[in-house]
């Protein structure tokens, strides 16, 4: 899980969009609750934005250099799959 410490090196910003109450966002909410503290500890000055909006599809947005953004749709994914999606976004920034 060394990639977790690479967030601030490979990305400029991470946004997590989710619904506060929908069942499709439940794994995303659980991922945030379990992993936010660790990610912030490893990347203290890196902006990790949690955006809650009623009825929205859960998504991960990664912003790279020069304003390039990539999105990962999280609907139907488990917490482990969400972690893998984030890892993939971080690895894209390394290349």
Image (tube, rainbow, N blue to C red):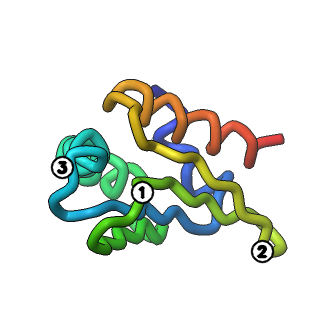
Categorize mark 3 by other alpha carbons within 10 Å: few (<14), some (14-19), many (20+): few
Q: Quadrant of the N terminus?
A: top left
For disc 3, the marked residue is: 33
Q: Earlier in the sequence, mark 3 or mark 1?
A: 3
Q: Secondary structure at mark 2?
A: helix
The total of numbered circles placed on residues is 3
Q: Earlier in the sequence, mark 1 or mark 2?
A: 1
Q: Identify the residue at image location x=63%, y=67%.
A: 12
* Inter-mark Cα distance, 3 to 1: 18 Å
For disc 2, the marked residue is: 67
Estimate the x, y position of residue 27 in percent, counting from the top left. 26, 39
Q: Secondary structure at mark 1?
A: loop
Above or below, comparing residue 12 to residue 93 in the picture:
below
Q: Secondary structure at mark 3?
A: helix
Estimate the x, y position of residue 29 in percent, counting from the top left. 23, 50
Q: Which mark is residue 57?
A: 1
Which is more toward the observer, 29 or 66? Answer: 29
Which is more toward the observer, 16 or 19? Answer: 19
Estimate the x, y position of residue 45 in percent, counting from the top left. 44, 70
Based on the displayed image, in which of its 4 quarters is residue 75 positioned?
A: top left
Q: Give the left or right position of residue 42, taking residue 86 as reference.
A: left
Categorize mark 2 by other alpha carbons within 10 Å: few (<14), some (14-19), many (20+): few
Which is more toward the observer, 51 or 64? Answer: 51
Q: Identify the residue at image location x=29%, y=45%.
A: 24
Based on the displayed image, in which of its 4 quarters is residue 53 positioned?
A: bottom left
Q: Give the left or right position of residue 79, taking residue 11 as reference.
A: left
Residue 35 in view (yes/no): no
Q: Nearest to the eye among marks 3 and 1: give it.
A: 1
Q: Nearest to the eye among marks 1 and 2: give it.
A: 1
């Amino acid at each position: 899980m060394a990639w977790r410490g690479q967030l601030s090196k490979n990305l400029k910003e991470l946004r997590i969009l989710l619904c506060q109450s929908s069942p499709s966002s439940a794994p995303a909410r659980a991922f945030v609750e379990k992993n936010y503290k660790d990610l912030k500890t490893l990347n203290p000055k890196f902006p990790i934005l949690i955006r809650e909006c009623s009825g929205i599809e859960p998504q991960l947005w990664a912003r790279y250099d020069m304003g390039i953004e990539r999105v990962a749709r999280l609907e139907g994914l488990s917490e482990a799959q969400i972690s893998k999606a984030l890892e993939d976004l971080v690895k894209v920034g390394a290349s």
